[in-house]
Image (cartoon, rainbow, N blue to C red):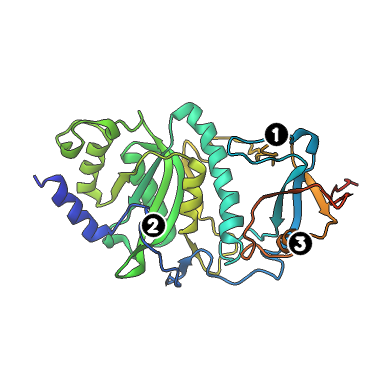
């Protein structure tokens, strides 16, 4: 029997690097395409409004902001404001895919898994790598086979995010279909804290043992990655490097299976309210009638050139009110 180091080397030769630590080295964002698939964010811009400033939400209750933080910042007389930009929420749009579509999808994934976790335990981050012999299969056939492969290993349900490409410093983006999964393992993943993890291929019955035995039969390598700090940030990051099929208007990058499928799990997604970090009141739409150049620059910019996603500003300028709440009709 080969040791763990040799096994790891052989698997990486076939499947490449399955870890998601892109931040360890600079990623070349050059265009990646293979057949009818391409990286998200490499299609056409939907319209001229994509990424343009839309409105600003804020909290101008300055009487509730009379406090000084531990780092010495005084918020007295200041309000909190958050600009909002237009988004078409399409995965192919190079302007809206990252801070529009991916954010929306990640929030849905987080909300749905939060509900399923109440019944099936912690959602793990899993990678299901397709062997070279199945590279020629259609997306539908690959997804169907991946679901069967995961169920054999005890993954009872979750969200599938399709990645058609992997990245390394030599080949850059190259075709290597696999699925990132945020899902539930029957009985939980107990191998992470196992003292015998470096030599667990002896029929212990744990997840790593089961996936190794199944790998000998079907050739699909399934690996559980490190414990996630945030389901939302994991989903958002994986969506940023996912793949979309060209020419399909409603191609779903993220899909659900097993106990988390739409048929078996009914969830009403409630999006988080925008709240002020100081007084915790809900943000409302505001209009700026001041003249400060730095504030005007933010409100006239687009998403890519705007360096401020949120900011604090004086409610009054030269004795006159600079921020006014918009009245709902």
Q: Nearer the viewer, residue 43 or 20?
A: 20
Left or right: where does residue 243 sit relative to residue 74? left
The label nearer to you, 3 versus 1, is: 1
Q: Nearer the viewer, residue 194 or 310?
A: 310
Q: What's the mark number on residue 296?
A: 3
Rendering quarter of residue 279: top right
Q: Is residue 241 above or below residue 45?
A: above
- Mark-to-mark CA distance, 3 and 2: 35 Å
Name the residue that disc number 2 marks. Answer: 22
Residue 75 is situated, as x and y percent measured from the top left of the image, at 71, 40
Of labels 3 and 1, earlier in sequence is: 1
Name the residue that disc number 1 marks. Answer: 67
Residue 221 is situated, as x and y percent measured from the top left of the image, at 27, 50
Label 3: state its secondary structure: helix
Left or right: where does residue 207 sit relative to residue 88? left
**Label 3: few (<14), some (14–19) or many (≥20) C-alpha neighbours in 10 Å:** few
Left or right: where does residue 156 sit relative to residue 47? left
Q: Is residue 136 above or below residue 158?
A: below
The label nearer to you, 2 versus 1, is: 1
Residue 86 is situated, as x and y percent measured from the top left of the image, at 70, 60
Label 2: state its secondary structure: helix
């Amino acid at each position: 029997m080969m040791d763990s180091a040799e096994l790891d080397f052989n698997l990486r030769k076939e499947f490449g690097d399955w870890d998601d630590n892109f931040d360890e080295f600079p990623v070349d964002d050059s265009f990646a395409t293979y057949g009818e698939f391409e990286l998200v964010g490499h299609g056409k811009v939907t319209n001229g409004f994509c990424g343009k400033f839309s409105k600003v939400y804020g909290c101008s209750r300055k009487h509730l902001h009379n406090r000084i933080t531990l780092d010495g910042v005084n918020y007295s007389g200041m309000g909190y404001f958050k600009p909002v930009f237009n988004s078409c929420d399409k995965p192919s749009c190079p302007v809206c895919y990252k801070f529009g579509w991916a954010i929306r999808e990640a929030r849905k994934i987080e909300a749905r898994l939060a509900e399923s976790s109440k019944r099936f335990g912690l959602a793990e981050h899993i990678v299901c790598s397709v062997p070279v012999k199945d590279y020629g299969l259609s997306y539908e056939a690959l997804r169907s086979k991946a679901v069967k492969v995961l169920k054999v290993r005890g993954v009872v349900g979750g969200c599938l995010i399709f990645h058609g490409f992997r990245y390394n410093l030599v080949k850059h983006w190259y075709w290597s279909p696999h699925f990132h999964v945020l899902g539930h393992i029957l009985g939980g993943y107990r191998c992470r804290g196992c003292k015998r993890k470096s030599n667990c291929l002896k029929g212990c019955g744990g997840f790593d043992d089961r996936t190794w035995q199944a790998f000998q039969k079907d050739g699909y390598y399934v690996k559980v990655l490190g414990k996630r700090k945030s389901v939302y940030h994991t989903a958002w990051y994986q969506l940023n490097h996912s793949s979309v099929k060209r020419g399909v208007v409603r191609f779903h990058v993220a899909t659900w299976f097993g106990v988390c499928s739409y048929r078996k799990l009914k969830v009403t997604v409630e999006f988080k309210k925008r709240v002020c970090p100081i007084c915790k009141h809900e943000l409302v739409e505001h209009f700026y009638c001041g003249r400060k150049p730095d504030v005007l620059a933010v409100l006239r910019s687009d998403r890519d050139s705007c360096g401020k996603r949120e900011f604090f500003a004086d409610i009054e300028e030269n004795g006159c009110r600079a921020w006014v709440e918009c009245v709902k009709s």
